[in-house]
Image (cartoon, rainbow, N blue to C red):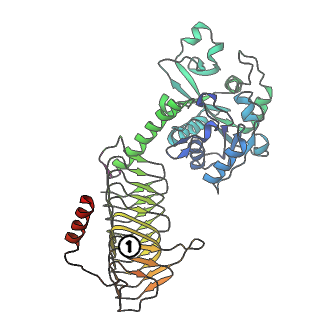
Amino acid sequence: MSVLAAVVLCAGKGTRMKSEKAKVLHPILGRPLCAYPLKRALELGATSVVPVVGHQAEAVEKAVRGLFPDAPLRFALQREQRGTADAVRSAEEALKGYSGRVLILYGDVPLLRRETLEALLAAHDQAGGKLAMVTTTLEDPTGYGRVIRDGGKVTRIVEHKDCTPEQRAVRECNAGIYSVDADFLWKALAEIKPQNAQGEYYLTDLVEMAAKRGPVGSVEADATETAGVNDRVELAARARVLQQRINEAHMRAGVSLQDPATAYIEEGVTVGPDTEIGPSVTLAAGTVVGKGCTIGQGSVLHASTVADGTLIKPYSVLEEARVGERNVIGPFSRLRPGTELAEDVHLGNFVETKKARIGKGSKANHLTYLGDAVIGSGCNVGAGTITCNYDGVNKHLTELGDGVFIGSDTQLVAPVKVGDGSYVGAGTTVTKNVPPGSLAVSRTPQVTKEGWVATKKARQAKARAG
């Protein structure tokens, strides 16, 4: 395959989105629209990728750099919206000195497959001309540029508003995706004039110019794959297709989805075989789930790692957490960033952790908050336990050794340490370190007054009578 660069058009405002946000920044499965064509270009090995920005240029550039911090990006600015040819011409300076193929993509076309682009480049090689293009056949081609052929050879593209009645009957349409030789591209763009009903510089004029210099290669793609996004209805429709693709790929790889229609799995998620995912589960980008796991209904995992054999019960939330093998989490557990669990840990209903490292076999099964804590192996943390880690200014660490037993309704006021094998009685507020093998209790003596209730009721009756 020849040396490759890519130009991705991301400059449009997207007025039909009815939004203050640039169209290409609207999210689809957790990523901006423009992330998908940019990623396809990078997957093909493009040595330079030029996002052409315009509306909200700084915001778009910041978002793209954040998504692809190590990518060979060179941004170009289209100062005025004067058509697609003008947008591509804005990238010329960014690709100065480059000689090779230039792939032209659109920031609002998220469903384009890598395989289609590989076929496009192959068609360019096979034709041996200056340009190759992607076409699609539509039942209703209204509004799309028609592919005009002569004896099967592509000769030009005519935009819908400029078509004759005969040309409007053509159903093969231009998808707007091209592979172009760089030297030809910049020379041809300089010659394009706005001689059309829109008064814009049409990129489609390249096709006729290339056809005069040699054969134009073409590859046909499904209309769904080449569909863009113009409004929020289309955004949702594209998201459904993308989600279906992702879910089907996981199922074919050995993952069970109880309800594929409601499983929300973003690109970049890894799930091992024999894992079962319940209805309405969300697995956000950066999440890795091992084999033989169960992710219960309504659970949400964001940028978290879950090792083999772990059971996550319904409606649990994991955020940048690391979970070891054979853990049991939930239901209704929340693991916040910095949580690291070893093997065989149990965290039950309404347990919250934050920056907590919990050792092998330890358990906290009910109504507990463990923040800024290091907990050893084999510990039992009773219901209602709280690590009091914040003094209003700073966060402090709570440390539990191995085999520690914490009774219910305990407050551990950090910084504090409880040594190996120690017990803390229920209802205790621990403010001092507990040596290994000790019992810590901080209760006032219980007082029982027999007959107190009857005496109280008699007083109340006398008061009412008086």
Let me know if residue 337 appears in the view: yes
Q: Residues within 10 Å of mark 1 (few under 14, many from 20)?
A: many
Q: Position of residue 430 (x, y in %)?
A: 42, 82
Residue ID for mark 1: 385
| Amino acid on which disc 1 is placed | Thr
Give coordinates of residue 173: x percent, y percent. 56, 22
Q: Does the stretch in magenta take in 254?
A: yes
Residue range in magenta is: 253-258
Query: In the image, is residue 335 above or below residue 218?
Result: below
In the picture shown, does residue 43 fall above or below 346? above
Residue 462 against residue 411 in the figure, above or below: above
Q: Is residue 222 visible?
A: no
On whether residue 305 falls in the magenta region, the answer is: no
Q: Residue at x 54, y 15 (%)?
A: 170
Closer-to-camera residue (284/330): 330
Residue at 36% in and 46% down: 280
- Residue 351: where, in percent of width, then height? 37, 65
* Residue 101 in the image, given as x and y percentages of width and height: 67, 41
Q: Identify the image quadrant of residue 462.
A: bottom left
